Amino acid sequence: MIPKAFKRALWVFHVNSGSCNGCDIEIIAALTPRYDVERFGIRLVGSPRHADVIAFTGPITNDMVDKVKRIYEQTPDPKVVLVVGSCGISGGVFHESYHLAGPIERIIPEAKCFYVPGCPPRPEAIIQGVIKAWEYLEEVEKK
Amino acid sequence: MLGELLFKTVIASIGITIFAVIFGLLFKGIDRKLVARMQMRVGPPIRQPFLDVIKLMSKETIVPENAVGWMYNLAPIICLASSIILLLYIPIGNFEPLLGGHGDIILVIYIFLIPALAMVAGGFASGSPFATVGAQREMITMMSYEFPLAVVIIAIVWKLSNIGGDIFSLQFISSHPIWEEVGLLGLIGGIILLLALVIVTPGEVAKIPFDVAEAETEIAHGLLVEYSGRNLALFYIADAVKMFAMASLVVALFFPYNLSDFIKLDEIVAYIADFLFFLFKVFLVMLFSISLVRAGMARLRITQVVSVYWITITLIALFGLVLLMWDNQYSIKWW
């Protein structure tokens, strides 16, 4: 019973960790009537305590490192990290910049990450990323 | 005698709890689906709130380090319990309220405060600045909608005092609909009072445009910011139950008509038909006072909430009261 519920009720907390705002707009686009992620029970929430998925957009800048760690720790288990955009994977257009603390797996090594490439990724791609995340959460709940 | 009463109370309380949780969540799902359809979206399935609750129950429950532990964990339970207690006083369909009696309408107004107070206590106990801001906003909202609500109820009770009887009981009010006691001026006054109560409803249950205390985008869910897992699920259910109870109160005050008053039905069929008709009336109240308003409006600022309730809605409600008063002096028949 529990894993089924996870499949259709995923709450996402969105963090801008140094993004150019392109991916943030695409995340908002996924909520609009055209894509409407609420039909899958996916909701954007305003507090990491309510979240199952933390969506990071952008590369992690030096200033954001401790905030990113704290947000990850504040989220109740089970949780996954969704990295939206190319920046979170390789640094993207900010590659080799002086203020980057690097991709997210270097900052939170224990996190289970899902990557959505693209600059910015299309809303369909973001939805697919969230679906990958919920498949994983289901697996966790089964164990 | 006492043992029998106690037994009845316990059984009925369990029944009401199951009923309240199931129908509260069901109506919440219908509300979400309707709002989505109004915004040209597909929307979540109607069973979505049940899935949300099951998911929240299976999550980790975190108590923050600088929270007051016992208060933090107690608040959601009080909030849910007092929301369910409300339904013990409000008549549902043809069934008599379990704990009804003299003066229960006044009691119901006060019990409506307890879920909000529990949320305030939980907010202050969670030790987050966002939650503190949310708790203060909740208290201000509470003070704002209380006066127009009291004016509406006092106006109805005062009008019914013409016929005499146990006027301060919900059972009496719902067996003497206000529309049957008034003339033309009173009819207009009644409609104005109904309008005021419909606008008080979203404030009472903290829905857009009056959900300043739980604003996601400004203060990160306000009161609920630190709550997670089981505690959040309890608040989620309490919110749904409170919404259902408030809509039932509007139905009991203004639309207490039963199907069996108009059509001759067998006893058991009448109970079922009245129950379904009651659910339909609650649905209509929620459609007009919560869903439509939620789909069409944005959130107000806290200052606007106060001025809307204290100035606009209070004046409207007082005008309705004055019309009911004039109705006693110049009785013009409307039927």
Image (spheres, rainbow, N blue to C red):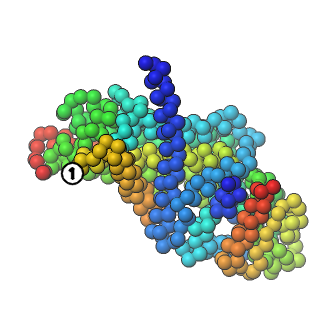
- Image location of residue A103, percent across then percent down: 85, 70
Residue B191's place in the image compared with B64, above or below, is below
**Position of B37 relative to B170 (above/below):** below
* Location of residue B110 in the rendering, given as x and y in whole percent from the top left corner: 44, 34
User: As drawn, which residue projects farthest toward the top?
Assistant: B1
**Residue at point 57% right, 36% down?**
B78
Residue type at numbered disc 1: Ile
Task: Look at the numbered disc 1 and give the secondary structure of its residue.
Answer: helix
x and y, in percent, of residue B280 in the image: 37, 54
Residue in the foreground of this view, choosing between A106 and B333:
B333
* Direction from residue B189 to residue B1 in the image, left or right: right
Of the pair B135 and B38, the residue shown nearer to us: B38
Q: Quadrant of residue A102?
A: bottom right
How dense is the environment of label 1, judged by Cα within 10 Å: few (below 14), some, or many (20 and up)? some
Whether residue A28 is visible here, answered yes or no, is: yes
Residue at 47% over, 34% down: B12
Asked whether, in this view, residue B103 is left or right of residue B117, the answer is left
| Circle 1 residue | B188
Query: In this view of the protein, can residue B133 be seen by the observer?
Result: no
In the shown orientation, is residue B114 left or right of residue B195?
right
Location of residue B324 (image quadrant): top left
Chain ID of residue with mark 1: B
Q: Nearer the viewer, residue B258 or B25?
A: B258
Identity of the residue drawn at 38% across and 31% down:
B100
Task: Provide residue B180's location: percent of width, then percent of height.
Answer: 19, 44
Quadrant the C terminus of chain A occupies:
bottom right
Q: Which residue sits at x=24%, y=43%?
A: B178
Rendered view: A96 above or below B153: below
